[in-house]
Image: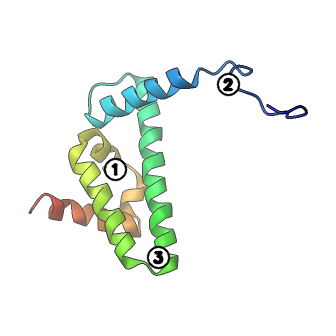
Amino acid sequence: MLAGDTRMSDEDNGIDRESYYREAADLWERGCRDELLDEKEARQFRNLARARFYTFVLSASHSQIDGDAGKIQSLIRSLALDLTRSPGLEREWHECEFSTEAFGALVTAMLDEVRGR
């Protein structure tokens, strides 16, 4: 850091970023597989899933403003594919409010299409 820089480094604030992200990745994988999680892990996984869904909504909303229908369809299909490959993530999807909003209803409808129904 430069002199006068008040930002904290990883060493200064005691955060082991490598360990933090490795643990989050492990939790994400186990949650997506719908493995049994303890209460704290389930809450953390729910927060990670909601962040994924929120990012989807923001991206789709931005694409709508830009008038990029192709991008919206791509985002919808991508999330639907993620959900079909990840039973725990799909469960969280159906339990959250994002699934009932405008773009969410399109994702839920796309689930049948990507499953070939």
Q: Residue at x 28, y 25 (%)?
A: 36
Provide the residue designation for mark 1.
93
**Nearer to us in this view, 44 or 24:** 24
Residue 73 on image: x %, y %: 32, 70
- Give the residue at the far front of this rendering: 2
58 lies above or below 51: below
Residue holding disc 2:
10
Q: Quadrant of residue 72?
A: bottom left
Residue 34 location (% of width, % of height): 26, 33
Residue linked to disc 3: 64
Find residue 109 and report its image quarter: bottom left
Q: Amino acid at mark 3?
A: Gln
Residue 69 coordinates in the image, percent (x, y): 38, 78
What is the basis of the colouring in this image?
rainbow
Callout 3 secondary element: helix
Mark 3 to mark 1 CA distance (whole Å): 21 Å
